[in-house]
Amino acid sequence: MVLLELKNVSKNFGGLQALNNVSFHVKQGEVFGLIGPNGSGKTTLFNCINQFFPVSNGQIEFMGKSILKLKPYHICRLGIARTFQIVKPLSRMTVLENIIASTFCHTRKMDQARHEAEEILHFCGLSVYKDQLSKGLPIGGRKRLEIARALATKPKLLLLDETAAGLNPSELEEAILLIQKIKENGVTILVVEHIMRFILTISDRIHAISFGQTIAQGAPDEVINDQKVINAYLGEQYAGA
Amino acid sequence: MNKKIQLYIGLTSAFLLLPLVVQSDYYLHLIIISLMWVVIGSSWNLLAGYTGQVSFGHAIFFGTGAYTSGILWTKLSISPFWGMLCGGFTAMIIALFVGWICFRLKGPYFALATLAGGEIIRLVATNWESLTEGMVGILILQNFRSKLPYYYIILLIAGLCIFCIDRVMHSKWGYYFISIRENQDAAESIGINTSLYKNVSLQISAFFTGSAGAFYMNYMGFIDPEVVFSLHYISIMAILVGIVGGVATILGPAVGAFVMVGIQETFRSSFFGLGPKWISQAHALVFGLLVIFVIMFMANGIVGDWSKIKKLYDKIFLYFHNKEGKEPVDSLMDSR
């Protein structure tokens, strides 16, 4: 079943075309990778999906219904949660409070919210930081907090924006395990990432964009061996390499 | 938790019994005014401290409440006591417009917009003479000659205000308010309707500020636009009360209110008549210095930095204690 579908999505910032006719769909239960060089429009695409920016053209459908013209909080209530590339922890709240604020997305009861938040902290391996202010977390912890906060809204689709950037190798392993665990729980994941090892391990399908345009799509092996992708990442002169 | 309930019960009973101790009308008046500022400061704190929307225009709601009560009496001959109930609600209606316009802006721009809003409404109240009597002001006769009933009325309002804010901050709304303060984008992304909840916060804040305004009308018996819509007597004072007491703490503004009214009165009366006359002119200057001091040394206010103050006190206490402790040693050396 198709969960999220983008049809010819374009986004202009004044004269700059950040996205140009991008189309793809994400099936339920898969991990869908989105790659592209710096400035290719990946984060813009995320901001378009959860309506931080209105799209200039095209259509975005979630579970068969258009989600254009909805507000970001509405998108979240529909079941699309996101993380931010530049982490946005609610700094002067404890880690637990961060998650509780998020669980209120689907519950009104304080006890239930607290209980669920603790479960999610445990799931994401953040229990040790529970009562710490979130501004005091190391970067790995903050990235995890982003994921935990998104998960606490009980999403059907999780948008991960460069969750692995800035992690050391062992943290990277843990992040891969965490994402696989999330997938096993039946959450569909759309992930943007630069670290190839990370995205090749977790993705079922990959979509590559460059300068806002689709250049390749398919299984991970196909995409990284695609000539256009190599050109985009390494430049024309390495095309033969 | 238990300790907190004990504190609240203790405070409530102390305030209920206070008039038994304070017999002088003058001091009771100061306490009444302080309690009024507890209400305004706490309301300001809910919006600015917890929700992060710093308002420079709380006089809008204070004045609206006061004028509601006054106009009900002068135009419709309805007892100003009803005004005390209505004041909060008219302030909420005005707050709808203020929120609708000002919440399009964020951060300092929001603050400036509310500042402008306060000045606009002051000018409207000054010039709309058929409704507000303009600069002539509204004069009513007080219902009670004793200050005691007023004391218990404002105590009730202040108690309700602090209780409500405490309950709100421990509910879903409280988490939402703080999330909005910390990061508006992140708040939107976890399903919080930020514009709705900013308005909810403003409504609660406006209701209590408006009630305080209506109380002021009843208690003082006279208002004019320069007093109740005043930028520096009301709007700025609300901010000072919040900052000095402790932003984003439940009891901070309450402490701040007593401190600020105390300082204001001390200077206004030239140290209760003991100091030189010119000191009464200096209270604005002292406020300025106080704010600089608070921002530099206790950015979280008296309640927020209580542990810091305690530490400092212990240090000073130890210092003097040691000095005294040294004396025997000195005398021992002398004797040698």
Image (cartoon, rainbow, N blue to C red):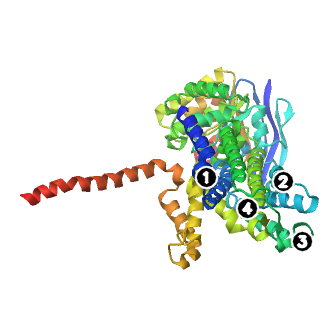
Residue A164 visible here: no
**Residue A141 image point, x, y percent:** 52, 36
Q: CA distance from mark 4 to mark 1?
A: 17 Å
Answer few, some or many: residues within 10 Å of disc 3's Cα (few below 14, many 20 plus, some between 14 and 19): few
Q: Chain of mark 4?
A: B
Callout 2 amino acid: Gly
- Which one is closest to the eye, mark 3 or mark 4? 3
| Between discs 2 and 3, the one toward the N terminus | 2
Q: In the visual, does A8 lie left or right of B53?
A: right
Question: Do marks 3 and 4 both belong to one polypeptide chain?
Answer: yes
Q: In the visual, does A137 lie left or right of B220?
A: left
Say the numbered circle drawn on residue B57: 4
The quarter in which the N terminus of chain B is drawn is top right
The residue tagged 3 is B129
| Between discs 2 and 1, the one toward the N terminus | 2
The residue tagged 1 is B253
**Residue at 58% across / 33% down in the picture?**
A96
Q: CA distance from mark 2 to mark 3?
A: 20 Å
Tag 4 secondary structure: loop
The residue tagged 2 is B83
